Image (spheres, grey):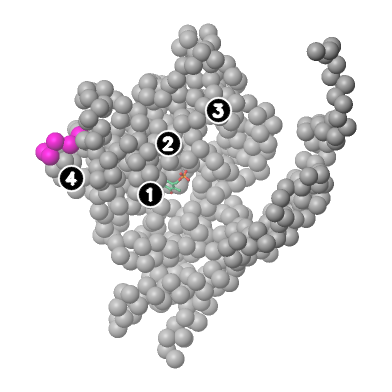
Amino acid sequence: MGSLDLSSDSSSSPQREFKPLDPEEFRKQAHQMVDFIADYYKKIETYPVLSQVQPGYLRTLLPQTAPYLPEPLETILSDVTKNITPGMTHWLSPNFFAFFPATVSTAAFIGEMLCTSFNSVGFNWLASPAATELEMIVMDWLANMLKLPNSFMFSGTGGGVIQNTTSEAILVTLIAARDRALATNGNNQSIRKLVVYCSDQTHSTFTKAAKLAGITPCNIKSIPTNLDAAFSLSPVLLRRVVEADVAAGLIPLYLCATVGTTSTTAVDPLEPLADVAREYGMWMHVDAAYGGSACICPEFRQYFNGIEGVDSLSLSPHKWLLSYLDCCCLWVKSPRLLVKALSTNPEYLRNKASESESVVDFKDWQVGTGRKFKSLRLWLVLRSYGVANLQSHIRSDVRMAKAFEGLVKSDPRFEIVVPRRFGLVCFRLNQFSWAGSGYTELLNRKLLEWVNSSGRVYMTHTIVGGIYILRFAVGATLTEDHHVAAAWKLIKEGADTILKGIHN
Ligand SMILES: *Cc1c(COP(=O)(O)O)cnc(C)c1O
């Protein structure tokens, strides 16, 4: 082997000059990209909200292999405009009223830039002390805004962590609960006896998490709800099912309650449910992915009544607190149980700080090892807007939803199906006295299809208690009163067309 001469690489390939992160080139291209994005946000209303492309459309438009030689950003961006944008369903369009909104803001975007720029892989405290410590502070700030008890805060006896999605928040708490139960009940056979509970309105992610945690599928019990109780989970019914399970020799493990269900924003009564959970030694989790954010306003905080009696709570600021995907905040009363279930200590991660147990290593609170410095995004949002602006953001969405509800009520052809609580209005075309429910469903399906295929508005549906419902979720960051008014006008036009069709 000759002497080490790095410049003597005999190859004359362009790789020799290849600098993937040249600060000046970065400055130039990043500015170009920011301009491109700002223009996109400015023009967003001119695109069909729901993409109108057919499956497989992109394969016919793009080359079959990656380019061998580099291409300039201008060329790539023009392809984005030509080929990618038409295949987007524009979640940030002010005319997006589907699912739940995915909210964004300048502060979160800038925070994301900063987070990405550091690219720190903060699995433990030492890997980036600021990343861990800021996350602890921000989680306490948000807990404080939500008036959570000290038992969920680092400044008290608990703590919080930023997960990617609700699925992961449920999965890690379920595994902590499972391991505690298995330790108590001795043998590995008892895993087949563990039972988890939810309502028929609980997000499907709960079933997924339960399967991932090794719960026997027939032990995932979904308690029925009904329209009369506005689809909230009945503590009486829950107790009855749990009692029967215990009598059959099963072990109650985990209860997932929801504040703001996905179909209709139903709220489960936390206090009496927590009583049942405590009595049977179950872990109780609250999934407040969407509705929880509203609890930063005093007038909505009642939906968290009884929260001091639960073991964990998750809430996704990407849904209603202007934070971009993905950001799901999880608070737990016993971080110790999470760490016990999830910690690993390979030699290559050993360090004095971790061994002194004076620091938090967030790798032991989540599925993955590596993690981004995500708290920067939330920190930027909280500081740039303040609690005051975040509260008025929630209130303004609720006010617009209320206005839409009023419009629906003013038209006798329509009805509100379940009471509105937050920014979601659940409504439908009325059932005609002479028509069956199947026919009413057909009319509503037609109306939804008519509205969505216009490209001017996008909303979605659900079926609860056998009733087909149209969902109008107000909350896309760019939505203003006139968008809501225009959407209603379009829906009425659709109703005119559909109903005229049946009378001819
Ligand atoms: C949206 C939603 C979820 C799924 O959230 P992810 O964070 O995307 O996993 C879970 N629960 C409720 C109540 C939701 O509204």
Q: Earlier in the sequence, mark 4 or mark 3?
A: 4
Q: Read off the residue under disc 3.
A: 370
Q: Is mark 2 within 8 Å of ligand 1?
A: yes
Q: Secondary structure at mark 3?
A: loop
Q: Earlier in the sequence, mark 4 or mark 2?
A: 2
Q: Earlier in the sequence, mark 1 or mark 3?
A: 1
**Which sits in the foreground, 91 or 290?**
91
Q: Amino acid at mark 1?
A: Ser
Dot 2 crowding, Cα within 10 Å, few <14, some 14–19, many 20+: many
Determine which quarter of the picture holds residue 61.
bottom right
Quick check: 253 above or below 91? above
Camera-nearest label, 4 or 1: 1
Mark pair 4, 3: CA separation: 40 Å
Where residue 216 appears, x then y in whole percent?
Answer: 27, 40
Q: Read off the residue under disc 1.
A: 204
Q: Read off the residue under disc 2.
A: 169
- Rendered-image quadrant of the C terminus: bottom left
Q: Earlier in the sequence, mark 4 or mark 1?
A: 1
State which region is magenta.
247-251
Where residue 466 appears, x then y in whole percent?
Answer: 30, 65
Residue shown at the point (54%, 11%) measured from the top left: 351
Mark pair 4, 1: CA separation: 20 Å
Camera-nearest label, 2 or 3: 3
